[in-house]
């Protein structure tokens, strides 16, 4: 899992790459509050499971790249991903 205190302390970060870290559990909802400046978020090739919470991505308005591929998510793609108006690359496969 991603430690919540880690996310809360990253208020000015523009990029976060946590790929290939064997992270497990559900994607924390707090990721949406991590940084309003976040442009790049790579969470691919981990073992996240469950659904992507509908309120977990929509506040990341400056996000250009979102890669959550190669995890074990289930359920539907949340509607708020459609609110990511700056998105250029979106990886949801596998």
Image (cartoon, rainbow, N blue to C red):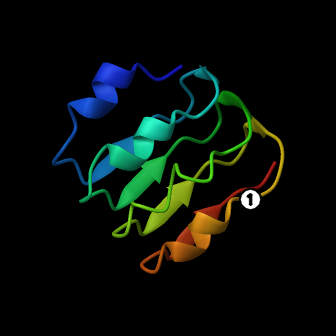
The residue at the point 71 percent across, 56 percent down is 92
The residue at the point 52 percent across, 36 percent down is 19
| Residue extending farthest front | 55
Q: Secondary structure at mark 1?
A: loop
Q: Is residue 40 left or right of residue 75?
A: left
Q: Is residue 48 left or right of residue 15?
A: right
The residue at the point 66 percent across, 67 percent down is 79
Q: Quadrant of the N terminus?
A: top right
Depth check: give the residue in front, 12 or 17: 12
Q: Position of residue 31 (x, y in %)?
A: 42, 41
Residue picked out by circle 1: 77
Q: Residues within 10 Å of mark 1 (few under 14, many from 20)?
A: some
Depth check: give the residue in front, 87 or 81: 81
Q: Position of residue 23 (x, y in %)?
A: 58, 22
Depth check: give the residue in front, 46 or 36: 36
Q: Position of residue 2 (x, y in %)?
A: 46, 23
Depth check: give the residue in front, 61 or 67: 61
Whether 34 is drawn above or below 92: the answer is above
Whether 46 is drawn above or below 86: the answer is above
Q: Position of residue 82 (x, y in %)?
A: 60, 74
Report the label total: 1
Q: Is residue 3 left or right of residue 8?
A: right
Quarter of the image for residue 24 reads: top right
């Amino acid at each position: 899992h991603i430690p919540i205190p880690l996310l809360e302390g990253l208020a000015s970060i523009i990029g976060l790459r946590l790929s290939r870290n064997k992270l497990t559990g559900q994607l924390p909802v707090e990721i949406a509050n991590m940084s309003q400046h976040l442009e790049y978020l790579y969470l691919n090739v981990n073992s996240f499971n469950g659904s992507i919470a509908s309120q977990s991505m929509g506040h990341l308005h400056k996000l250009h790249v979102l890669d959550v591929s190669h995890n074990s998510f289930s359920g539907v793609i949340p509607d708020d991903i459609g609110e990511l108006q700056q998105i250029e690359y979106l990886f949801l496969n596998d």
